[in-house]
Structure formats: C-alpha cells, structure tokens
Image (spheres, rainbow, N blue to C red):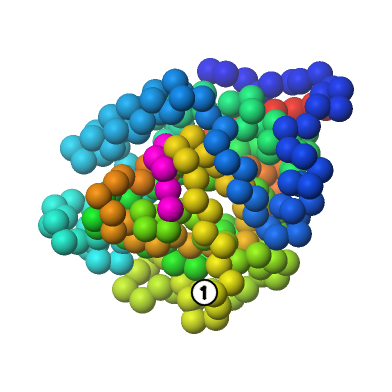
Amino acid sequence: MQSAQTVEARNGYKALSQEQVASFWENGFLVVGKVLEDELIDEMRAEYDAEFALARSGERPVRNLAVTGEDDHDHGDDEQELLQFMQISEHNLSFHQLTYHERLLDIIEDVLGPNIQLFHNQAIYKPPHHGGPVFWHQDNAYWKCLPANLVSCWLTFDDVDLHNGAMQFIPGSHLRPMIHDQAQGSDVLLDMGKLVDDSQAVVADLPAGGITLHHCQTLHRTAPNTTDRQRRALAIHYMTPGTKSARTNETIEVSFSHPMLRMRV
Ligand SMILES: O=C(O)CCC(=O)C(=O)O
C-alpha cells in the first residue's frame, strides 16, 4: 500500500498560474485541460472497461443512478444508464495509483494547500446513446461537510462536449450553499434545476486526459449522453485534514478509505 507522500518544500514551483488559481476562487471552477499522458489514458481506459465489465457480471458494487433505472440489472436498450462506481481506487491498482498522481496533487495543492486527504472517488460512466443526466447540484448538498472547502478533480478518459456529458458549471455559485430538491423519480439524485438559469452555464469541453476542478458548492450538471461515443469519467474529491461531517459533527479520520495523499508538515 502506497503511503502519503511527505514532500519537501516546492521551492516556488506551481502547477497552476496565479491567474488560474484566482479564476478558480472567483468562479468556483477551473477548466485545466489535458493533464494525463497518452500512455496513462490508454491504461486507464483498459482498466475502466475491465472494471465495468466485472460490474455488469455483478462482481463490482456499481449502481445505476439514472432516474429510469429501477434496479442494478437487466436494463433494456432504451433505458438510461448513469453507472456510479464508488471508491474504484479500492478495487483497482491503476485507479489507486491515479489518486496519488504527482501532477494532479500539485494542481490540487495550488488550490487546497499542502495537506491533502482523500474524501472519496467515483467513476461515473455514461454509455453511448442512453447515458443518463446528472442534474444541477452542489456536491456539499449531498456530503454536508464542514468547513465547506472540498475540491473535486473531474477527469475524462474520452473527449467530452455538451452532447456526451461534459461538465457544466454556474460561475460564482460556490459562494452560497442552497437547499436542494430531490430529483423527480430518484431517491438519490438532487435537482436544483428549477432555480438555475441555464443560460449562465459554462460547458467544459475537454480532450481525453483532461480535467476540471470545482469547489464543493459550485452548481454543476452533466447532460445525457446522446452520442455514439462513450463517456468514461472519474471524480476524485479532496479535502483538508480536519474536515468534519456535519451529519455526525465528527472529523473524518485518516483511514483506508480516507488516506492522506500528500503532507508537508
Ligand atoms: O460525471 C458526472 O456526470 C457528474 C460528476 C459530478 O457531479 C461530480 O463530479 O461532482
């Protein structure tokens, strides 16, 4: 098991420019662009496909969050799928290693600071033609963490645009937590759609291997995948040590599921 990296001082090195960091805090998100190397993208695609093949044969804990999905099995062709595989890094070594990817942690350090703990990660798969949407939400409406300063890195292993489920963000929405409605037909998904002005949305087109960052209060969504392309994505959610769950008022301790990914103290 890889342990947290204790890294020497960075000697002024920054992975993001000052303008990018300022833009992240002003808007609540940042479209960083391609970060992963081609060889790694190929490896991750192969591992992703293998994991979801295991999921389809019931050997992985994957659930279908799409509102039309009534169970985890036997989905007809016209039924939407939005497959969520929580903590894929605990099942697969390549995903485990990706959570420790130096460049990703350098980028996260620029916005979150030098001590970085994993909150969790999730692979979210939208198959061609019938990939279901994720409705407008702020992550912390699900998580209820304190302080609300978690940061997510969303990675795609396929080229993404509006039509196969690229991330969409509402600039500046991270400054105010909102009470969320339950999505119609789902006991999992939240939906702020009624209160969001879609014309404000910024669509984050990305090439395979690209990433966006978002704050845990930034309103975001992804559209259905109506294309003949896959949308294989992974979200890694980071926090600073000492973050509490507001549900229990207890600190989320360092553990197998919440390892320290980087420490400088
Ligand atoms: O991958 C998606 O479609 C949505 C991801 C998301 O909502 C998140 O990373 O917070």
The percent position of residue 196, horizontal first and vertical second, equals 55, 77
Compared with 179, 116 (above or below) is above
Q: Nearer the viewer, residue 220 or 114?
A: 220
Compared with 60, 243 (above or below) is below
The residue positioned farthest toward the bottom in the image shown:
194
Q: Is mark 1 within 8 Å of ligand 1?
A: no
Q: Nearer the viewer, residue 205 or 142?
A: 205
Residue positioned 74% across, 53% down in the render? 23
Residue positioned 86% across, 22% down in the render? 11
The percent position of residue 184, horizontal first and vertical second, equals 36, 76
Q: Nearer the viewer, residue 187 or 238?
A: 238
The percent position of residue 84, horizontal first and vertical second, equals 37, 48
Compared with 12, 175 (above or below) is below
Name the amino acid, label 1: Asp
Res 264 seen here: yes
Magenta stretch encompasses residue 125: no
Residue 153: which quarter of the image?
Answer: top right
Could you tell me how many numbered marks the image carries?
Answer: 1
Magenta stretch secondary structure, dominant: loop
The residue beneath circle 1 is: 198
Residue 57: which quarter of the image?
Answer: top left
Residue positioned 29% across, 33% down in the render? 49
Quarter the C terminus occupies = top right
What is the secondary structure assignment of the residue under circle 1?
helix
Q: Nearer the viewer, residue 172 or 261?
A: 172
Residue positioned 74% across, 43% down in the render? 112
The magenta segment: 157-161
